[in-house]
Image (spheres, helix red, strand yellow):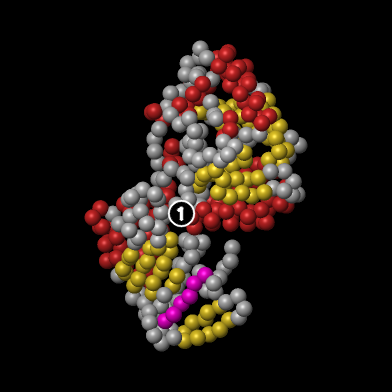
Amino acid sequence: MSCDPPWSGSVGECTGRTSFTSRSSSKRRRRTSTQGPVTVRTNHAMPLWWKRLIKASSAEWRFPAPYTSEPMGFWFLYIIGKKGETKKRIETETRTSISIPKPGLEGEIVITGQQRGGVISARTRIDVLLDSFRKKQPFTHFLSFALNQPVVQEKFLQFKEEVLEKCSQDHGVSSSLFQNPAKLHLTLGTLVLLNEQEIQRACDLLQQCKEDFVDQITGGKPLSVEVAGVEYMNDDPAMMDVLYAKVHMKDGSDKLQVIADQLVEKFVASGLMLREWDRVKLHATVMNTLFRKDPSGAEERSSTVSGKSSFKERESFNGRNILKLFENFSFGEVQLDAVLLSQRYSSDASGYYGTAGRLLLH
């Protein structure tokens, strides 16, 4: 990550009454302006911990606002508050003026104040509010490896047929529990991407990960994995909510696990992903009680992360016989050649999730 301040070079510009240094790709130059207030324009990739502003009599800070297709995005409740109380309180306590895009429109949040300290304080408080907002949102995208190759789909359909044939009398077992074979995948982590800038940041970060460590681990070759065996997530096999197929490297190495863990580390550090586990659990969901109400197979993240409780709505199933009969069931061997930034509630021509970006392993 570059350590250049976000207002330097091509990222932004400053004009003001004080002397400052401006940098470009070709040279450094020093200039002094005697007119107008200082303007600091930040780009969307600026880390939230960067709080430095140059000394000036006044300053303006711009950064992208979250955008949703809803007429009134929920984030307004966090920044503006009831009858504008939250926004007014921040403005009063930090002695700033805050401009926010109208509901339903994409744009910038602009903070203007006479003292840089006030502007920094207002930005920090808005960051906290937006972070709280993000944590309560259902995820929009997720990092995945596609496991919908023909051989795996065929074996999965065989698994489904045999389970329904041998275990349909068990409590809660029905065809509505099964994953859509075209959407079989390995989830690495989920993301809440609130606008096009954040989607682009995620795509750029994927490419950075490829250069930083992925190519070194894979040697520029796809990963050969085997999808075999089933396991469950909760404590009681008689009250299952999720049954998944296990995924492991054919050569017995930990390459897949290392790549998954390091990708999540990078995305968590960027602020685009929330940490759910200390280590990525490599699994491919084959049965899920959430699928009863969500046949698209789009529900992936636990309800505690999304801020919504759905456990009371789930009807668990007795999976004891499934575990006994299909403990070592083989779903086939596949070549993993790309990490995908998949979009929730979408489908491409193959039936898999729409792809917003990808990291090629070869």
Identified at 45% across, 26% down, the residue is 292
Identified at 66% across, 23% down, the residue is 329
**Which residue position holds label 1?**
195
In the picture provided, is 103 more to the left or to the right than 254? Answer: left
Magenta segment includes 257: no
For badge 1, the amino acid type reads: Asn
Residue 104's spot in the image, x, y percent? 35, 53
Q: Return the residue found at the far left.
A: 83
Q: Nearer the viewer, residue 198 or 234?
A: 198
Magenta segment includes 15: yes
Residue 337's spot in the image, x, y percent? 69, 43
Q: Quadrant of residue 328?
A: top right
Q: Nearer the viewer, residue 139 or 130?
A: 139
Would residue 324 be seen by someone viewing this image from the given angle?
A: no
Quadrant in the picture for the N terminus: bottom right
Identified at 50% across, 63% down, the residue is 46
Residue 202's spot in the image, x, y percent? 55, 53
**Residue 47 to residue 169: above or below:** below
Residue 94's spot in the image, x, y percent? 32, 67
Secondary element under disc 1, as helix, strand or loop, is loop
Q: Which residues are magenta?
A: 11-16
Identified at 43% across, 43% down, the residue is 138
